[in-house]
Amino acid sequence: MLDDDAERLLDVQRAEHTDRMRKLRKAKREGSLADVLLADHALFHIEADLRWIDLTASRLERAARAGATVIGQTADPAALAFRCAA
């Protein structure tokens, strides 16, 4: 997963999210209070997704520079939950 496919996928996601944000901002300018609140909710989620995309791209880039060639082992969900809880 450290190849160009992962980078391309993240770029596509970033572009789609950016386009969606543009549309939501327009809806906020033209909509009712309910529209504004719903758009704000969606925008906050998209912003979090974009932060994740940037973080993931950075980690993949660092791993590639370090010579890692394979990512893809499925994490043990119990181990992941334990690490997240710590």
Image (tube, rainbow, N blue to C red):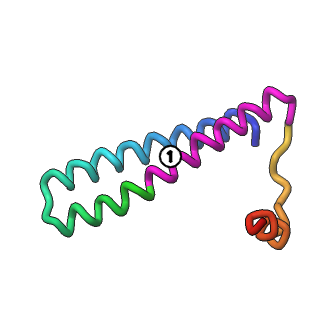
> Does the stretch in magenta take in 72?
no
The residue range painted magenta reads: 46-68
Vertical placement of residue 29 versus 76, above or below: above
Task: Give the total of numbered labels.
Answer: 1
Instruction: Give the farthest residue toward the top.
Output: 65
Drawn side of residue 24 relative to residue 10, left or right: left
Comparing 8 with 31, the one in front is: 31
Which residue sits at x=58%, y=48%? 52
Report the quarter where the N terminus lies: top right
> Does the stretch in magenta take in 49?
yes
Q: Position of residue 85 (x, y in %)?
A: 75, 68
Q: Secondary structure at mark 1?
A: helix
Report the quarter where the C terminus lies: bottom right
Comparing 14 with 48, the one in front is: 48
Instruction: Give the farthest residue toward the bottom.
Output: 78
Drawn side of residue 43 relative to residue 33, left or right: right
Which residue sits at x=20%, y=69%? 34
Which residue sits at x=60%, y=37%? 8
Which residue sits at x=20%, y=55%? 28
Q: Pointer 1: what residue?
A: 50
Q: Position of residue 54 (x, y in %)?
A: 58, 40
Which quarter of the picture shows residue 83? bottom right
Q: Position of residue 10 (x, y in %)?
A: 58, 42
Q: Amino acid at mark 1?
A: Leu
How packed mark 1 is, by other alpha carbons closer than 10 Å (few <14, some 14-19, many 20 or more), is some
Which quarter of the picture shows residue 81? bottom right
Q: Main secondary structure of the magenta part?
A: helix
Vertical placement of residue 43 versus 34, above or below: above
Drawn side of residue 78 relative to residue 32, left or right: right
